[in-house]
Amino acid sequence: MLTLTHTNKLEPTPEQIKYIENTLNVCTSVWNFALSMRKDWCKSRVSPINACSIEREYIMSVDEPFPNYHVAAKQLTEAKKNNDWLKSANAQVLQQTLRTLDRAWDDMKQRGFGFPRFKNKYRMRSFVFPQLNKNPISIDSIKLPGLKEVKWRMSRPIPDGFIPKQARIVRKASGYFVILSLQLDVDIPDPLPHGHPRGLDLGFDKFVATSDGLEIKRPRFLKTLQYKLKLLSRRLRNKRVGSNNRHKLNQKIARLHERISDTRKDWHFKLAHHLCDGAGMIFIEDVNFVSWQRGMLSKQSADASFGQFVNILQWVCWKTDTYFAKVDKNGTSQTCPNCGTHTGKKPLDVRLHDCSNCGYSTTRDVAAAQEVRNRGLKAVGQIVLENVCEDVIQH
């Protein structure tokens, strides 16, 4: 099953905007109530019997089941019988809100994520229609449950054969958007190793260096507009909480952040396509970029957004039939790509690679990219050899 997502900007009427905002408010209340039930259930079982609080302690029945998705969905059904405000929102949308909370809770337990947050009117920014009617898409509008036909700007046509499965309405600083999930019942194999190999080395001095000798500087997306953010943030301190002026200023700051994010993402896509042109294989270091944002260069790392670029690069490689693989990151700048000699650890201020064994000299980042390419080719050779051996054994 092949799944694609398309993002298009909506042009809703005032009545449709009112419906969207009302749905977001209902989803916020449902999320907060379901999360408070889970939190209260945990509090009632966290305190030992001989160490209760002197002031008060939350008490819940021992037989009370954990308020998971099914329990919360049943409570929501009962609450909607006597609450017209809950009825004003689509039932499936509210169920998807509970499912999202359930996934966030599981991620906290299994993947070490933080405790799910309570939402306010600014934090709850989207909701999902899990089902759409037949043929909901036209050139200038889309049919959505409860909203009927909403005008939109179709940025690109729907590919032939793809069926829209669900739609997510997102409220951003620049307006309302719809993210369509498109599916096609087809299995496409991953690209196989072929063509010209290209190794990549990511860094702060040069955003990316290739094994072909290309070096691209790291653009300063945040730094170029940081003075505007500081100015607006300074003005925000003097605005009264809850006032219209504070809300308007928050909107300006959000639009500026969105502009920075969109510019960064657009540059990442263009760079990924440029790197895939003329290459049949792309190799990159297997780096945990989360650890890069915990040091003294955390701000620069967040501005560069290396993790987002790697995800985009992997998607572009798949789309352009380019083989993508990650290799071991240890010692790529300490090994000569020409002769394989270990040259020792280099300080960060040393930006040149000069091998004393074979005399090969180049920039440090290009040498690391060439070593990444060599390791990738070695791993690809092992994969091909293993596949050949399996075929010989089977025959």
Image (cartoon, helix red, strand yellow):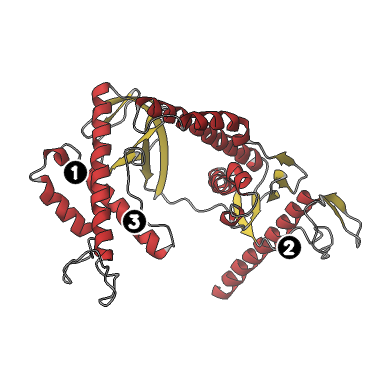
Q: Which residue is mark 2?
A: 331
Q: Which sits in the foreground, 46 or 132?
A: 46
Provide residue 50's location: percent of width, then percent of height: 27, 77
Q: Which residue is mark 3?
A: 103
Quadrant holding the C terminus: bottom right
Q: Is residue 216 visible?
A: yes
Residue under the point 53% across and 43% down: 319
Q: Residues within 10 Å of mark 3 (few under 14, many from 20)?
A: few
Q: Which sits in the foreground, 199 or 362?
A: 362
Q: Which residue is the extreme one toward the front?
A: 54
Q: Which residue is the extreme one toward the bottom?
A: 50
How far apart are the two marked residues, 3 and 2, measured between alpha carbons? Answer: 38 Å
Q: Residues within 10 Å of mark 1 (few under 14, many from 20)?
A: some
Q: Earlier in the sequence, mark 1 or mark 3?
A: 1
Q: Which sits in the foreground, 389 or 317?
A: 317
Residue under the point 56% across and 43% down: 316
Q: Amino acid at mark 1?
A: Ala
Q: Amino acid at mark 2?
A: Gly
